[in-house]
Amino acid sequence: MQKKLWMVVALLLVMPGLLFMVSCQKKVAAQAQPAPAPVAAKPAPAPAPAPAPAVMAAPAFMTERIFFDFDKSALKMESQALLKKKGEWLKATANAKLTIEGNTDERGTAEYNMALGERRAQAAKKFLVDLGIDAKRISTISFGKERPIDPAHNEAAWAKNRNDGFVVSF
Amino acid sequence: MRLRKLLCGVSALVCVVCMPISSTAQDTTQYIDIRNPFLRKIPLAIPMFKNVNSGAGEAEYSRKAVELMSGSLDFTGYFKILDRSAFLFDPQKGGVSATDINFQNWTVVGAELLITGLFEQSGDTIQMELRLFDTFKSRQVLGKRYAGSVSELRKMVLRFCAEVIYYLTGNKGIFNSRIAFVSTGSGKKEIYTCDFDGANPTRLTYNESISLFPAWADDGQYVAYTSYKAGKPDIFIRNLNTKQETTIAQTGINITPAWVPGKFEMAATLSFSGNQEIYLLTGAGKVIKKLTSNRGSNVSPSWSPDGSKLAFVSDRSGSPQIYILDVATGNESRLTFEGKYNTQPSWSPRGDKIAYTSQVNGFQQIFVIDAGGQSPMQLTRETGGSESASWSPDGSLIVFSTNREGPYRLYVMTAFGTDQRRLLLLNGEQTNPKWSQGVFN
């Protein structure tokens, strides 16, 4: 993941013009995909403009999680609104790919939670595919109850841990 | 094939020689009916063994053997091991065979069964004569002689324990069995194994990832499990001898493997079709056929001992419940109706009961239910959770994971929920125990 980010950063350094051509970004980025490896491999000491392109690559709402009720994989209204926003961006950023990570809280048992986590990830994927995003651009993975974002054992933590996480790659 | 492997395993132990001592009229009285929930523990006396050479080293091995025997027989839950300090017996002076024993000395301290031992160690060799007596009938019911190296002491003692249990219950017991489990001792969830009594814990995987849901093949030569070591949940089938692994890495989840009793095949949940269905697979991971057809989750298969039926978890009713699939007819019927969250079925090797986990007041608790669906009975009630029940190969004990002490630890109880005790103490947390079913070494 980090490597890919560096690749993007390196590419942007090679083509600073890109910074001012947001509307063309996807095209240029798509063409630039087979970048010569040596360039990417150089761990360039990140100069000042580095944070800016990273933000451009994936806006904050793209990695914002959606949350679920206990033992449910149905998408809530606010989750659907957020997924629509993510869908628009994916439409406008054709070279971006999305991994959806399904998670559950610690209650319940590991086996069933792994299945539940996958259904949560699949629910978000189906919603995006129904919006017209190519299914091939979206992959899902379930972590079940294995990767809580809040390790506490209370309702507040459980509510946070019942989620889909989103990872954008190019 | 399988049998041959088993025989090979046995013949590898030729150095442990075991022969019956004096012919004993084997009567067929069954002392212990392990299906009886109100089983009375039989008072058993195991005095210190009589040492032949009475050297300090010999005395130490002899003491170890007595303690291992007492602990192992106590572990089964069938006996009340009597306090040795109450015995009117000097093992060095008293005899070890029926003609030399004053049985009244034993009935008066309450012993109904007595085990004596004659113990000899010279150099690396240990020889033992072990005898089981019925004190009220004043006669020997079992006698065995063992010889082996010092490192085989545990094996020899456990063999005799197995003979005792076989004589008293009519089944082979648990002393050859092992338990696979997940431990976080290294910082990551890895698969471990230990002996039936928690001895010899051994780390099996070094995946540096999340590894879960171990399952023993019947011959004890393979363990299948789920791991994220390739980035997503795949099933790995590990040959314990060669350490080679085959992989089931279809798109989606590949979880909860369960070996078919007596076969090199397994059931597991795969979601490559888009639905989470249970498939029958070869031991090499090839799909033979799809067993379930239902939208939603179908996970956690557990085979009936004859391999004709499969208990599993499905959320088709809106909440996770346990269902039974008749493999030949394809009929599926719901088993559990009480409780809103019933998972982790484990079919007893005797076939009559299914253990499972049910959420009660926010905590997971272990229940058993008749395989026909009658009389669900709660076995654990402690605050904190108890889950992942797995039966001993004789159906007499259940190993499970509980956080009643804080961190998750492995515990053992009888099939009726009595004698709940910790199995072993390791760093980290221990979950997902799975008891091997076949008899192997």
Image (cartoon, coloured by chain):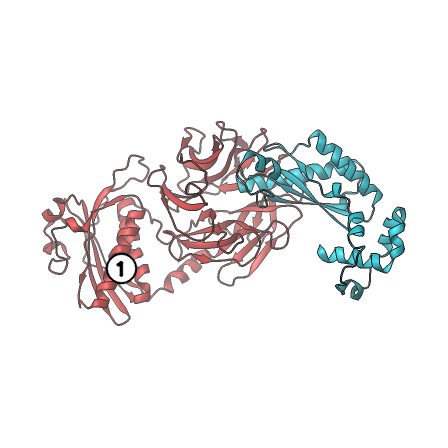
Figure label count: 1
Instruction: Where is residue B123? Give x, y as percent.
Output: 26, 72
The chain letter under disc 1 is B
Residue type (three-letter) at the residue carrying disc 1: Lys
Is residue B229 placed above or below B121 in the rendered structure? above
Q: Give the side of residue A96 with respect to residue B94, left or right.
A: right
Instruction: Where is residue A29? Give x, y as percent.
Output: 85, 53
Q: Give the side of residue B406 with respect to residue B44, left or right.
A: right
Residue at the farthest front position = A48
Is residue A102 placed above or below B208 in the rendered structure? above
Is residue A160 placed above or below B201 in the rendered structure? above
Q: For mark 1, what is the residue?
A: B64
Which quadrant does the C terminus of chain B fall into?
bottom left
Say which residue appears at 39% left-offset and 47% top-offset: B393
Element marked by disc 1? helix
Which chain did the renderer colour red?
Answer: B
Q: Give the side of residue B183 with respect to residue B117, left or right.
A: right
The residue nearer to you, when weighing B403 against B116, is B403
The residue nearer to you, when weighing B197 against A69, is A69
Say which residue appears at 38% left-offset and 44% top-offset: B412
Instruction: Where is residue B1? Give x, y as percent.
Output: 47, 58
Instruction: Where is residue A124? Give x, y as percent.
Output: 71, 38
The residue nearer to you, when weighing B331 against A23, is A23
Say which residue appears at 38% left-offset and 51% top-offset: B196
Which chain did the renderer colour cyan?
Answer: A
